């Protein structure tokens, strides 16, 4: 990181204080801009990871990531997000999430090898589909492997947050 040099004017401490106050304002602004930049990059990376893991576009399109109070809030509509992230059933148990934050239950005994039907839409690549009496499209599964797109994006964020914010701070020009 580049050194920040501030000349101290011993003849006028009020000018020195003003310079330091100006520098503090610039640093605060650079950090805010860095966090906003990080939030945009995080959202882009999360979308790319969702697509790479084959999450249906109907789910990807609901993603919103916003910087709030120095953090990032991620909102994805739908109740199925956890099932994509952690996996389900026999398939999920054989390829579990790398770091579940809670004990995740892979429903093996309730459905076992026989699998089950789940509600879906036309974007689902599963070829085993039918429409039930209520008009709901359903697909057959023995479960899904973990597709840890949130975990992978979080790991990317941990590696890149400091660098992104630091680059904004480095751009500060001292008068």
Image (spheres, rainbow, N blue to C red):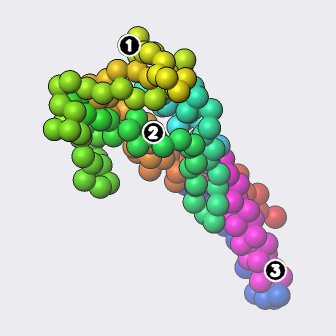
Give the secondary structure at mark 2. loop
Q: Residues within 10 Å of mark 3 (few under 14, many from 20)?
A: few
What residue lies at 55% left-to-right and 33% top-to-bottom? 59
Q: Is residue 52 magenta?
A: no
Q: 91 or 134, which lies in front?
A: 134
Decide: is 173 above or below 127. Answer: below
Q: Which of the 4 image quadrants contains residue 114? A: top left
Task: Report x, y in % for residue 22.
Answer: 79, 72
Q: Which of the 4 image quadrants contains residue 102? A: bottom left
What residue lies at 32% left-to-right and 54% top-to-bottom? 101
Give the secondary structure at mark 3. helix
Decide: is 54 above or below 107. Answer: above
Q: Which numbered disc, 3 or 1, marks the residue closer to the eye? A: 1
Task: Report x, y in % for residue 98.
Answer: 27, 41
Q: Which residue is mark 3?
A: 18
Q: Which residue is mark 2?
A: 80
Q: Which residue is mark 1?
A: 128
Q: Which residues are magenta?
A: 15-37
């Amino acid at each position: 990181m580049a050194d920040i040099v501030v000349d101290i004017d011993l003849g006028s401490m009020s000018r020195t204080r003003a310079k330091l106050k100006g520098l503090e304002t610039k640093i605060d602004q650079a950090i805010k801009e860095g966090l906003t930049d990080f939030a945009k990059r995080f959202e882009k990376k999360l979308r790319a990871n969702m697509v790479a893991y084959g999450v249906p576009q109907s789910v990807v399109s609901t993603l919103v990531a916003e910087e709030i109070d120095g953090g990032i809030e991620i909102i994805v509509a739908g109740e199925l997000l956890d099932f994509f992230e952690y996996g389900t059933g026999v398939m999920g148990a054989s390829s579990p999430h790398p770091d579940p934050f809670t004990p995740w239950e892979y429903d093996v005994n309730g459905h076992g090898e026989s699998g089950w039907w789940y509600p879906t839409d036309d974007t689902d690549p599963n070829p085993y589909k039918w429409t039930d009496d209520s008009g709901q499209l359903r697909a057959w599964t023995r479960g899904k492997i973990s597709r840890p797109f949130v975990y992978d994006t979080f790991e990317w964020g941990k590696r890149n947050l400091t660098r992104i914010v630091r680059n904004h701070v480095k751009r500060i020009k001292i008068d």
